[in-house]
């Protein structure tokens, strides 16, 4: 088979996404975002699964049409098995299983966190693919990991958060500042106008390659409460500087651990992935690390950083090539072994 058409479905959290790939090229990558959660200040699982059920058929339909293929042209179905919200995962998983049965084509169950990393192997003009082995920093709303990637199928977590994920650190800080959910992108936006050294926050002391972000959140909360008590307009008057300082602290925590990981493994190829890798400060700092530390860094195309089905599809394609298929009894998993 010289053309493998993969349909991929991602439904782990609050975005319903479907993509069609021809080999390692993306023909379509459709994401339906769920606005319902904004007014609640976070993802409401029950509403998320209902919205997935509503969106899944139209999203897949659009993905097939945009790719210009029929469902009978498909060779493989890939779906997100986990980790994620159970009710959300079940919608995508059940749909993928039914479609694979109806079309009589193989099914590949994909780990969402591995997909954030392997998204770097999507063929895109102007984007290099990393070579094995490399280090991946995966930073999202639910995870913060440093992973040693030995091959498509051999990935090893060498560091991870012991409490909050980086995305939560951004979103919870934003909430303290009165910004709407998800606040990460807003902190990024305001930080661009601010002084990153205006308010020094202390970094947590965590051994080895692990991370901790819950202390930072508490520190920011007390800092804001103390200053607002003295000046009710403190946040408004210093928004850019506060955001820049928070972002700078988070980036320094990440970079300090990456430096140790490079030293310990002797690997200086670094790829980032996950929603937080959309952050402009993180992207800039990693680019600068190429000349500063002699690293080779890989920053994915923006649309492949936040949750999307194309990254699930590329994992599906590489498994298809190896005949690594899931059987029809495969189940969704909220937590999943790496
Ligand atoms: O990977 P993702 O789309 O979903 C999860 O699997 O969690 O990541 C979402 C997270 C949210 O916490 C969001 O605030 C954060 O990524 N995020 C950002 C930026 N864009 C998205 N955080 C900081 N700066 C950004 N530009
Ligand atoms: Zn994600």
Image (spheres, rainbow, N blue to C red):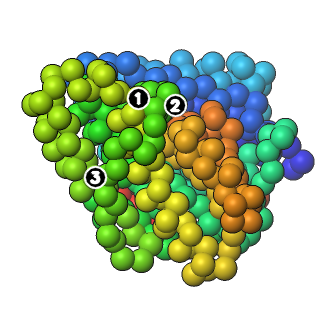
The image position of residue 153, as x and y in percent, is: 63, 67
Cα distance in 3D space between marks 3 and 1: 18 Å
Give the foreground label among 3 and 2.
2
> Could you say which disc has been placed on residue 39 in the image?
none
Q: Is mark 2 within 8 Å of ligand 1?
A: no
Q: Is 331 displayed left or right of 214 in the figure?
A: right
> Could you say which disc has been placed on residue 240 in the image?
1
Picture residue at 44% right of the left edge, 72% below the top: 209
According to the picture, the residue beneath numbered tag 3 turns out to be: 216
Give the foreground label among 3 and 1.
1
Picture residue at 42% right of the left edge, 77% below the top: 208
The image position of residue 189, as x and y in percent, is: 48, 27
Cα distance in 3D space between marks 3 and 2: 21 Å
Closest to the observer: 4 or 172? 172
Establish if 212 lies above or below 28. Answer: below
Picture residue at 26% right of the left edge, 26% below the top: 235
Is residue 188 visible in the rendered image? The answer is yes
Closest to the observer: 333 or 338? 338
For label 3, the SS is helix
The answer to whether the residues at label 1 and label 2 have Cβ atoms under 8 Å apart is yes
For label 2, the SS is loop
Q: Is mark 3 within 8 Å of ligand 1?
A: no
Establish if 21 lies above or below 180. Answer: below
According to the picture, the residue beneath numbered tag 2 turns out to be: 192
Is residue 329 visible in the rendered image? The answer is no
How crowded pointer 1 is (Cα within 10 Å; few <14, some 14-19, many 20+) is rated as many
The answer to whether the residues at label 3 and label 2 have Cβ atoms under 8 Å apart is no
């Amino acid at each position: 088979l010289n053309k493998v058409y993969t349909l991929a479905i991602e439904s782990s959290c609050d975005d319903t996404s479907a993509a069609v790939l021809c080999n390692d090229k993306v023909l379509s990558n459709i994401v339906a975002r769920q606005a319902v959660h904004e007014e609640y200040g976070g993802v409401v699982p029950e509403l998320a699964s209902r919205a997935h059920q509503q969106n899944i058929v139209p999203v897949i339909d659009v993905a097939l049409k945009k790719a210009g293929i029929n469902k009978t042209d498909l060779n493989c179905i890939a779906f997100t098995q986990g980790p994620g919200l159970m009710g959300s995962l079940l919608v995508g998983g059940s749909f993928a299983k039914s479609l694979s049965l109806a079309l009589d084509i193989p099914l590949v169950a994909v780990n969402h966190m591995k997909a954030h990393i392997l998204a770097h192997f999507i063929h895109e003009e102007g984007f290099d693919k990393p070579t094995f082995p490399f280090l991946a920093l995966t930073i999202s709303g639910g995870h913060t990991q440093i992973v040693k990637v030995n091959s498509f199928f051999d990935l090893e977590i060498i560091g991870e958060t012991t409490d909050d994920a980086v995305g939560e650190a951004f979103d919870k800080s934003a909430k303290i500042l009165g910004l709407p959910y998800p606040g990460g992108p807003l902190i990024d936006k305001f930080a661009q106008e601010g002084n990153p050294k205006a308010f020094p926050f202390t970094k947590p002391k965590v051994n080895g390659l692990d991370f901790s972000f819950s202390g930072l959140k508490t520190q920011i909360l007390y800092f804001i409460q103390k200053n607002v008590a003295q000046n009710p307009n403190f946040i408004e008057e210093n928004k850019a500087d506060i955001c820049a300082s928070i972002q700078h602290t988070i980036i320094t925590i990440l970079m300090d651990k990456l430096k140790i990981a490079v030293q310990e493994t002797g690997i200086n190829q670094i790829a980032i992935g996950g929603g937080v890798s959309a952050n402009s400060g993180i992207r800039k700092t990693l680019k600068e690390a190429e000349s500063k530390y002699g690293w080779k860094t890989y920053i994915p195309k923006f649309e492949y950083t936040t949750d999307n089905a194309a990254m699930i599809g590329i994992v599906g394609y590489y498994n298809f090539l190896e005949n690594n298929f899931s059987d029809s009894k495969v189940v969704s998993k909220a937590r999943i072994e790496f």
